[in-house]
Image: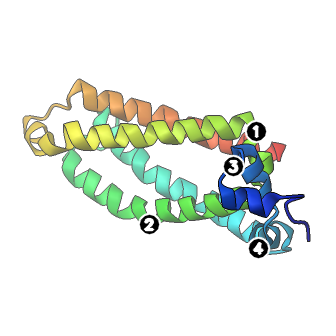
C-alpha cells in the first residue's frame, strides 16, 4: 500500500497542504485504497451511485416539470413537491454518500479533471437555486397554487434545475470515462 510521500502526515496535521496535495494524500489513505483496489466494493459503490441518481433526479424532474407547466398540471405544486421531496431525499443522501466514497477512491485524479470541477460548480449552483426557491417561493406556494399561476421566478428556478442536473449527469459520466 502507498502512503503520502515525505512529510505528508506532518503537513496535513499542520494544515499547510494545498488542496491538490490533500486530494493526493486522501487518495492514498488505507480507506481510499481499500475502496479503489477492491474487486467488488468499488463497482458496488459506483453501481449504487448510478442507480440511485435517476431515482433522486427523477423526483426533482417531476417537480420542475410541474413548475414549468409541462406536466402534472392537474395536481397542486405544493402536494407534488411534498411527494417529490419525500421520495428524492433518501436517494439524494445515497447519491451524496456514494459520490463521496467514489471521490475518496480517486481524489487526486478527480481534482485535476475539468468535468469534476464543472460538476462541483453545478452542484453548488443547484444548492443555491434550491435555497433561493425555498426562501423566496416556497413560503407563498399555497397562495400561487390556489391562483393557478406559477411565478416566473419559480419557473426560472425549475428551468435552471433541469439544465444544471443534466450538466451534473453529463459531467459525471464523462468524468468517469477519464479517470
- Other-residue count near label 2 (Cα within 10 Å), few / some / many at <14 / 14–19 / ≥20: some
Residue nearer the viewer, 46 or 110: 110
Q: Which callout, 1 or 4, points to the residue nearer the camera?
A: 1
Look at the picture and state if 50 lies above or below 152. Answer: below
> What whole-number distance in Å separates the C-alpha atoms at marks 1 and 4?
23 Å
Q: Closer to the observer: label 3 or label 4?
A: 3
- The residues tagged by marks 2 and 4 sit, at their Cα atoms, a distance apart of 21 Å
Which residue in the structure is indicated by mark 4?
Answer: 41
State if disc 2 and disc 1 touch (CB < 8 Å).
no
Q: Residue at x 41, y 59 (%)?
A: 88
Label 4 SS: helix
Number of residues whose C-alpha sits closer than 10 Å to that of mark 1, classed few (under 14), some (14–19) or many (20 or more): some
Element under label 2?
helix
Identity of the residue drawn at 68% across and 62% down = 13
Identify the residue under disc 2: 90
Local SS, label 3: loop
- Residue linked to disc 1: 113
Q: CB under 8 Å between callouts 3 and 4?
A: no
Name which residue lies at 52% across and 42% down.
123
Amino acid at each position: 500500500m502507498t502512503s503520502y510521500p515525505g512529510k505528508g502526515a506532518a503537513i496535513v496535521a499542520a494544515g499547510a497542504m494545498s488542496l491538490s496535495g490533500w486530494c493526493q494524500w486522501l487518495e492514498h489513505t488505507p480507506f481510499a485504497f481499500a475502496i479503489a483496489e477492491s474487486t467488488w466494493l468499488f463497482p458496488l459503490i459506483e453501481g449504487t451511485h448510478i442507480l440511485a441518481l435517476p431515482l433522486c433526479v427523477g423526483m426533482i424532474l417531476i417537480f420542475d416539470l410541474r413548475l414549468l407547466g409541462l406536466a402534472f398540471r392537474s395536481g397542486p405544486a405544493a402536494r407534488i413537491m411534498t411527494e417529490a421531496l419525500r421520495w428524492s431525499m433518501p436517494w439524494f443522501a445515497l447519491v451524496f454518500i456514494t459520490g463521496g466514497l467514489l471521490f475518496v477512491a480517486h481524489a487526486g485524479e478527480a481534482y485535476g479533471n475539468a468535468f469534476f470541477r464543472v460538476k462541483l460548480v453545478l452542484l453548488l449552483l443547484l444548492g443555491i437555486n434550491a435555497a433561493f426557491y425555498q426562501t423566496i417561493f416556497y413560503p407563498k406556494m399555497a397562495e400561487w397554487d390556489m391562483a393557478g399561476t406559477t411565478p416566473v421566478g419559480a419557473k426560472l428556478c425549475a428551468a435552471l434545475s433541469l439544465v444544471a442536473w443534466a450538466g451534473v449527469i453529463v459531467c459525471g459520466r464523462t468524468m468517469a470515462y477519464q479517470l
